[in-house]
Image (cartoon, rainbow, N blue to C red):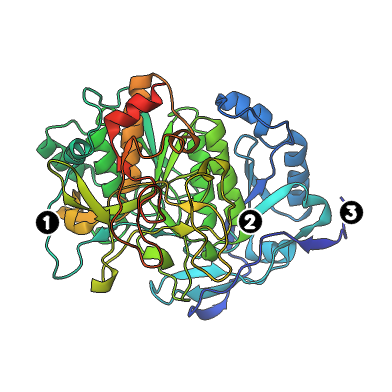
Amino acid sequence: MAARERHVPLPGSEKSPVPGAREIGPVPPEERFEITLVLKPKQVKAQTSGIKLSREEFASRHGSSAEDVERVKEFAKQNSLQVEQSDTARRTVILSGTAARFRDTFQVELKRYQHPSTRARFRGRSGQIFVPESLVPVVAAVLGLDDRPQARPHFRPIRPGAKAASTYTGPQIAKVYDFPAGLDGTGECIGIVELGGGNSPGDLDVYFKKLGLPVPKLVIIPVDGATNAPTGDPSGPDGEVMLDIEVTGGIAPAATIAVYFAPNTDRGFVDALTTAINDSQNKPNVISISWGSAESSWTGQAIQSLNQALEDASKLGITVCCAAGDGGSSDGVSDGLAHVDFPASSPYALGCGGTTIVSPTGALKEKVWNDLSLGGGATGGGVSDVFPLPIWQGSANVPPSANPGGRVGRGVPDVSGDADPTTGYSVRVDGTDTTFGGTSAVAPLWAGLIALINQKLGHSIGYINPLIYPKGETDVHDVTIGNNGAYSAGPGWDPCTGLGTPDGTKLLSALSG
């Protein structure tokens, strides 16, 4: 590689400042940190749809090439950066160095900022990342130069002044949705991605003892230096962690739950997911993700990298359930437009929206969860600004986007479940018994159900989206009442609750074929 090779912008790397963030000053040039370079996959013939690869087959067919890894290592050496780790299956190379070296190598300006809402300090950049022209065909993303918070946990406490109409534990919600009896997740592993917080073993002991269930087997996997680190604040990320574990553990108590803790950055998110899907020791075949943010808050390179990881999961026969967000059709963005949440908007994710249970007895009655007018939350959903309409969603009557131009794109969510905090989930977190809702609860709800289905089938159902759409609403409870702002529910698929909420026994029967 020539010493003075021309540098060009890395496609999709442009980043804007965080609105309202206060600039504190430059990043000290001697400050050391790590970044992840995401490499492009080998160019291979298209995989036959529905064929699931082993992790070894996947690495051989779709990992990065050894030659590309060596090119990146040589690039790092020439720029006095250290290679900390490389993984051809994950297609990642982790580099460490000083802020000064990264600044000069990628031609970026790094500054310290204070976040306008959390007051947390972060390292930020704006503009594009530049790389040698010869690396553009090799490198898909450079993540970690900027470590601003990327995602939000999608759980909601009951709004002040509201009272719970009903609350559910994992076993109780499983009965409401008629999950198949006689299954407990034996032999299955559920992966959970967490971007902060932690769990207390004492809380889990108390919680599951009350349910009369064994405490699930937990495996903690640190990613990028993060680990299980409870904050002591029930309304913080601990609430997300405990909700995820207690819902999945209540539905599939005999399953192993592998929790991948990573920093709340775009780098951390990508590294957590690629670590989970390539985990050859725990081998999760369903993954729950309850973190996300509006598509507009991501760089192109980060969306591409995370979406590629989700596509990888589909090739490996792993189902990934993603919360669709709690900010209604705007996804909490205040620009007056409709937005959908990513990664739920990826065509390789099972997007999970939210409902309110009106009556759990007799014929189940539900409506769209929307409490925005009273200061609460509402299910996310709508039409993607990034992803085109998938083939398997072609007959779902996805409407044009509510935004000007009426774009036709990927419809979100795919399915839904109880998410209203007033009909929410009993959880124990940081020594406190409380009730949470949010689409954060729906992703682990569906992950638990899929673990039971996998147990019964004796194999992973894998990429479930193309399988459930042709079956229509016969295996779900169709939700036809309510709206999330710009979009309304109706018969069949809609941009509030997708196909509907689960009828677990019917879904198992349909997928058994």
Which tag, 3 or 2, sits closer to the chain's start?
A: 3
| Most foreground residue, 94 or 266 | 266
Select label 1 or label 3 by which is in front.
1
The answer to which quarter of the image holds residue 288 is top left
Residue drawn 65% across the image and 29% down it: 47
Q: Specify the farthest residue to the top.
A: 458
- Residues tagged 1 and 3 counted as in contact (Cβ below 8 A): no
Q: Which percent across, then down, holds residue 446?
A: 34, 40
User: Which mark identifies residue 325?
Assistant: none
Residue drawn 89% across the image and 54% down it: 2
Residue drawn 51% across the image and 39% down it: 275
> Dot 3: what SS?
loop
| Most foreground residue, 496 or 206 | 496
Q: Which percent across, then down, holds residue 354?
A: 31, 53
- Residues tagged 3 and 2 counted as in contact (Cβ below 8 A): no
Mark-to-mark CA distance, 3 and 2: 26 Å
Q: Name the side, left or right, on which 451 lies relative to 124.
A: left
From the image, tell me which residue sits under label 2: 301
Q: Amino acid at mark 3?
A: Ala
Mark-to-mark CA distance, 2 and 1: 44 Å
Specify whether residue 181 is in view. yes
Select label 2 or label 1 by which is in front.
1
Mark-to-mark CA distance, 1 and 3: 68 Å
Q: Looking at the picture, does residue 345 appear above or below residue 339?
A: above
